[in-house]
Amino acid sequence: MLDKFTLNNDSCQYSCKSCCRNSAHMLPVTDWLSDIPQDLNENDLVEVQFKNTRKGYYHNDLHLPLEKGTPVIVAANPGYDLGEVVLTGRLVPLQMKKNHIDTTRYEVRSVLRIADDADLIRAEEAHKKESNTMIKARQLAKSLGLEMKIGDVEYQGDGTKAIFYYIADGRVDFRQLIKVYAETFRIRIEMKQIGARQEAGRIGGTGPCGRELCCSTWMTNFTSVGTGAARLQNISPNPQKLAGQCAKLKCCLNYEVPVYEDARRNGVVLGTPVAAEEQEEDLGFKNAVGEGDVTRFDRKKKDNNHNNQHRNNDRHQRHHHDNRR
């Protein structure tokens, strides 16, 4: 058994004694009950993470010694898949409840075994096909005239099935496309639609704040962001500044909304410290943006109004002097 191994050209790194950072650098859930003794018979559920942000919940029927970071082979439909255990114990049912998983409809399969070297090599060979498959899949979708984009391809651990993640504005009839994919790639096909935010999280990047995108570092669930969040915080409705790399409203607009809502309910007026701004002017600090400062329009407008007033006064005085003559 390897103590440490990599999959998909270093895009997914597993370690038996450490946290896993997958291709999108998503951190797993912190098990804050890990140091408390637990009875294995009390709960046999484990949370398993696959490529990107895909996760699943499985029964540890065989009572294997699973801990965070253990690579496991789990039952799939069809065949099996390779993933990594990211959560065990009492927190797993709470995590399922948090993710609104209906246990009466969700099929909880089983962990078959701990992955060995042969499983890892087979999964690595399958993951190496993903890049070329995605390029070819895009070409086939374009040839059929479908208004959609293949954003990513994920092969199952045994290489018998692949999930094609696609982006589309509306409904797409891809029944013919599935037949073409099955004949071309000789695998079982599953189509899964994702949004622009999920695509940005898979690609990654740096936001205007200078940090990595939240969707590609720590966010696992996406909530809708409305323009009301910007109005509540009195943010200028500038589409170029409010939109993220996904061309949607930035997720961070929601971060401080509860604070503003609470302040409004309690009648608290929120503002920025004026003293700091005055001190900045006294010390001669200059805005780093320079001419990009939007207040320059206000200053120019005030100057124009002042000059116009002087010109009007001069004309009025000359007109009054001519009437007297």
Image (cartoon, helix red, strand yellow):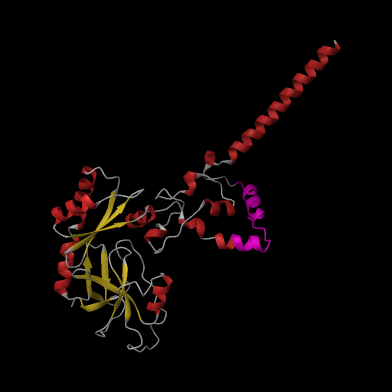
Whether the magenta-drawn stretch holds residue 210 is answered as: no
Q: Is residue 201 above or below residue 103?
A: above
Q: Would you identify the image quadrant in which residue 63 lies?
A: bottom left
The quadrant of the image that shows the N terminus is bottom left
Q: Where is residue 283 in the image (x, y as percent from the top left)?
A: 62, 49
Viewed as shown, does residue 135 lie left or right of 242?
A: left
Of residue 123 and residue 145, the one placed in the foreground of this image is 145
Q: Which residue is located at x 18 percent, y 70 percent?
A: 79
Q: Position of residue 133 (x, y in %)?
A: 19, 54
Viewed as shown, does residue 202 lie left or right of 124?
A: right
Q: Would you identify the image quadrant in which residue 37 lies?
A: bottom left
Q: Is residue 62 above or below residue 167?
A: below
Whether the magenta-drawn stretch holds residue 266 is answered as: yes
Of residue 156 and residue 71, the one placed in the foreground of this image is 156
Q: Position of residue 200 (x, y in %)?
A: 36, 54
Q: Position of residue 49 (x, y in %)?
A: 30, 70
Residues in magenta? 260-284
Q: Which residue is located at x 19 percent, y 63 percent?
A: 161
Total labels drawn:
0
Q: From the image, give the main secondary structure of the stretch colored magenta.
A: helix
